[in-house]
Image (cartoon, rainbow, N blue to C red):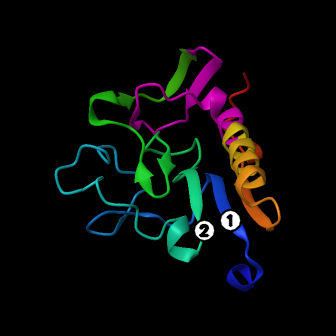
């Protein structure tokens, strides 16, 4: 239906459906050194990410604001450059948008600019960008955007 109907598709926000670390394919949840472990190759795309089930594009996190890595992935590729990787301790962290919360025992690696208080707005802005781009380039074709915000459950990080 998607291909026959000419749909342009995007997945934006919390994937949380089992993406795996390249190239070995292990589960990502709970790996504290997920971004710097020498056995992982982040020059490769995620395994079992949105592209693997047919989405044309994506801007997502593996587990929302819940678990490491505290980084976004665009079209399956990590957006954090190696020099911007830091370890986030559990707790509240001051951020430009309020309190960025790393929940309970879920410390782990992520982007130095991670801000859970900005998560939903980042996802909304990426969704707007997808729709604007679609209307500019393929206005006569249908689109489908699967948008999974992080506001569904705790920890809540309001701006």
Q: Is residue 115 magenta?
A: yes
Q: Residue at x 55, y 35 (%)?
A: 103
Helix, strand or loop for disc 1: strand
Q: Is residue 25 magenta?
A: no
Quick check: 17 above or below 74?
below
Q: Which residues are magenta?
A: 95-123
Q: Residue 83: horizontal and vertical position, in percent?
A: 27, 29
Q: Residue 88: horizontal and vertical position, in percent?
A: 41, 29
- The residue that label 2 is drawn on is 55
Q: Residue at x 22, y 48 (%)?
A: 37
Which quadrant is the C terminus positioned in?
Answer: top right
Q: Residue 72: horizontal and vertical position, in percent?
A: 50, 44
Q: Residue at x 73, y 40 (%)?
A: 124
Helix, strand or loop for disc 2: loop
Q: Residue 137: horizontal and vertical position, in percent?
A: 70, 55
- The residue that label 1 is drawn on is 9
Which quadrant is the N terminus positioned in?
Answer: bottom right
Would residue 65 appear left or right of 39 to someone viewing this image? right
User: Do the CB atoms of the residues marked 1 and 2 lie less than 8 Å apart?
Assistant: yes
How far is the residue under mark 1 from the one under mark 2?
Answer: 5 Å
Give neighbour class at mark 2: few <14, some 14-19, many 20+ (Cα, 10 Å): some
Q: Depth check: give the residue in front, 140 or 35.
A: 140
Q: Which mark is residue 22?
A: none
The quadrant in which residue 146 appears is: bottom right
Would residue 5 appear left or right of 16 to someone viewing this image? right
Quick check: 34 above or below 46?
above
Q: Is residue 16 visible?
A: no
Quick check: 6 above or below 129?
below
Q: Count of labels shown?
A: 2
Q: Depth check: give the residue in front, 67 or 112.
A: 112
């Amino acid at each position: 239906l998607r291909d026959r109907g000419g749909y342009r598709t995007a997945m934006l926000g919390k994937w949380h459906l089992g993406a795996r670390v390249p190239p070995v394919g292990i589960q990502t949840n709970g790996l504290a050194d997920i971004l710097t472990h020498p056995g992982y190759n982040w020059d490769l795309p995620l395994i079992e990410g949105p592209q693997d089930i047919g989405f044309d594009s994506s801007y997502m996190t593996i587990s929302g604001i819940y678990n490491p890595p505290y980084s976004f992935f665009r079209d399956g590729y990590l957006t954090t450059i190696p020099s911007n990787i830091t370890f986030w301790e559990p707790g509240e962290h001051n951020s430009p948008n309020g309190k960025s919360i790393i929940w309970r025992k879920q410390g782990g690696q992520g982007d130095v600019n991670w801000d859970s208080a900005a998560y939903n707005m980042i996802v909304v802005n990426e969704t707007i960008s997808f729709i604007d781009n679609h209307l500019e380039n393929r206005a006569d074709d249908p689109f489908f955007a699967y948008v999974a915000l992080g506001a569904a459950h705790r920890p809540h990080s309001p701006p």
